[in-house]
Image: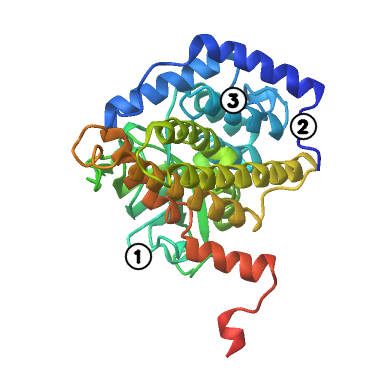
Amino acid sequence: MDFRDSPEEAEFRARLRAWLADNVPPGGFSLMDQERNSFELEWHRTLYQGGWMGLSWPKAVGGQDLGPMYDAILNEELGAAGAPSPPSIGFLGRVILSFGTPDQQAQYLPGLLSGTHQWCQGFSEPGAGSDLASLRTRADRTDGGYVANGQKVWTSRAQWSDYCLLLARSDPGSTRHRGLSCFVVKTDTPGMTIRPIVQISGSRQFCEVFYDSVFIPESQRIGPEGDGWKLAMSTVAYERGPADIGSISKHRRTLADLQRLAATSARPDAAQRVARCRVQVEVLRLHVLASLSQRVRGHLPGPEGSVDKLLMSETDQLLAHTKMYLLGSAPLLGETPGDLYDYFWSRAASIYGGTAQIQKSIVAERVLGLPRPSARR
């Protein structure tokens, strides 16, 4: 595989570098909660106004029809410039692109792409995180739509979101992955209550969300009734892609920080540890390019994406751990709170979007074709 840019990609990369030289915002990485959200939202809108959002999305919804490789170039150049990551809206937008009606795409996608509206994902529940098929939130049929009742948890940024992509059980007699449906719900709908959860870092980014007789018009269901599991799996397949959630740019930015720290560190193994990080980031980058090449050929994300997710989680945690090692006591003494926040956040990388254990099972069974544990007994 040739990983070099085509002439068109090289021209795009050069234009992006020139734009970034004048537009990277200072600071922002140590902010928390509302201030951090506002900083990232402003960066989202700056990228959109500069023409760098929706690179591989259709022009009909505000995109540029450029192809998946341009998303990878954006990630790489943002990281190299020390810029914030792009907003992780791709995995939510893709499900509406794939399963929404033309009217739904026209209604929801331009605002998502431009940063006019913020979104969250209402999948996980108490007792239904990694085992998502056991969810109990219901969306019962009523005149003109559905009435939702239940609870979601670990819903990122729900308190700042305008819309939530909700997965609920629309067939009350169904079990497991059958009888689920996907809905778009406005977060100011009566009966919807959002409560932030205090994390170990002190942040309140995660929320629990309660649905108490929340009415959802039928026009806000995405895809056919009962097809929710397929939509959910499509969503998480993109959510597990490092290019779709902007992790490559974050890793490259962190790697640059590590190289600067190693140059002045008193740790005798500093260079060796940073070299290991550099290899890990490069392995992930090349694997992501290989995955995106499959998309260029028309292959949608499948179970192979679990390899990307595992590599991403390992890279997140290795970089954050190495940075803490090189910084010594400074983060713990409150001198660099953003680094401590990033370390705590990295611990969640092997949980969100599907735990590492779940990803390994997917790779074993659906990629390598190994028998399920029950089949071996």
Task: Residue 57: tell me if it is visible.
Answer: no
Q: Residue 4 carries which label?
A: 2
All told, the count of numbered labels is 3
Front tag of 1 and 2: 2
249 left or right, relative to 6: left
Indicate the quadrant containing the N terminus: top left, top right, bottom left or bottom right.
top right
Residue found at the very far top of the displayed protein: 22
Label located before the other in sequence (3 or 1): 3
Indicate the quadrant containing the C terminus: top left, top right, bottom left or bottom right.
bottom right
Front tag of 3 and 1: 3
Amino acid of disc 1: Gly
107 left or right, relative to 13: left
Amino acid of disc 3: Glu
Label located before the other in sequence (1 or 2): 2
Tag 1 residue: 127
Q: Residue at x 45, y 49 (%)?
A: 318
Tag 3 residue: 77
- Do the CB atoms of the residues marked 2 and 3 lie less than 8 Å apart? no
Please tell me whether residue 53 is drawn above or below residue 69 in the rendered image: above
- For disc 2, the neighbor class at 10 Å (few under 14, some 14 to 19, many from 20) is few
Considering the numbered disc 1 on the image, is that residue within a helix, a strand or a loop?
loop
168 left or right, relative to 65: left
